[in-house]
Image (cartoon, helix red, strand yellow):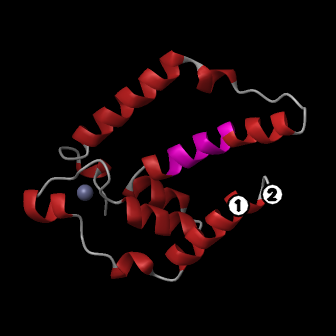
């Protein structure tokens, strides 16, 4: 049961994005009306690229869609090992400094992608 729910949710998400759901969604209203990229711009296209296994394109569209699930996977692996009585710990992700650095990078990315074309979603 510990693995069934997350794997089912992941498989459902991959299936949704694999079948072309992003093309059926409306464009981001922040970009449509404000003409600037919000922190979530490109996230749907990044998830679709990730569902197709295209990690470079997913990073290009919105790097948070790649980085955040990777971090969530590390936390989840710790809990799975803990539930089986084993110890698996990634100390870096538990440091407050890591959280602050990641938040700072994400905030900088959210702003800079409006000024540096290489960071903007395609
Ligand atoms: Zn947006």
Ligand 1 image position (quadrant): bottom left
Q: Which residue is mark 2?
A: 1
Badge 1 crowding class, 10 Å Cα cut-off, few under 14, some 14 to 19, many 20 or more, is few
Badge 2 crowding class, 10 Å Cα cut-off, few under 14, some 14 to 19, many 20 or more, is few
Task: In this rendered view, identify the residue nearer to me: 57 or 46.
Answer: 46
**Residue that extends furthest to the right in the rendered view of this protein:** 85
Q: Quadrant of the C terminus?
A: bottom left
Q: Position of residue 39 (x, y in %)?
A: 29, 47
Image-based side of 46 in relation to 8, left or right = left
Our reading of the magenta stretch's main secondary structure is: helix
Figure disc tally: 2
Using the image, determine if residue 33 lies above or below residue 36: below
Q: Residue at x 32, y 76 (%)?
A: 25
Task: In this rendered view, identify the residue nearer to me: 59 or 75.
Answer: 75
Using the image, determine if residue 52 lies above or below residue 23: above
Q: Is residue 121 magenta?
A: no
Q: Position of residue 42 (x, y in %)?
A: 34, 60
Gap in angstroms between the C-alphas marked 1 and 2: 7 Å
Using the image, determine if residue 63 lies above or below residue 104: below
Task: In this rendered view, identify the residue nearer to me: 51 or 84.
Answer: 84
Task: In this rendered view, identify the residue nearer to me: 71 or 4.
Answer: 4
Q: Which residues are magenta?
A: 66-75
Q: Which residue is mark 1?
A: 5
Residue 52 visible to an observer of this rendering: no
Image marks 1 and 2: residues in contact by CB distance under 8 Å? yes
Q: SS for tag 1?
A: helix
Image-based side of 34 in relation to 103, left or right = left
Q: Residue at x 60, y 43 (%)?
A: 72
Q: Residue at x 35, y 82 (%)?
A: 24
Q: SS for tag 2?
A: loop
């Amino acid at each position: 049961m510990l693995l069934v729910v997350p794997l089912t949710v992941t498989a459902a998400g991959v299936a949704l994005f694999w079948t072309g759901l992003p093309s059926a969604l409306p464009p981001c209203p922040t970009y449509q009306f404000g003409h600037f990229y919000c922190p979530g711009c490109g996230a749907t296209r990044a998830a679709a690229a990730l569902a197709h296994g295209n990690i470079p394109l997913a990073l290009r569209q919105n790097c948070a869609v790649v980085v955040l699930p990777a971090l969530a996977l590390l936390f989840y692996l710790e809990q799975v090992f803990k539930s089986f009585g084993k110890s698996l710990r990634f100390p870096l992700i538990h440091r407050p400094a890591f959280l602050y650095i990641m938040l700072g990078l994400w905030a900088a990315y959210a702003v800079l992608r409006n000024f540096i074309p290489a960071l903007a979603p395609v």
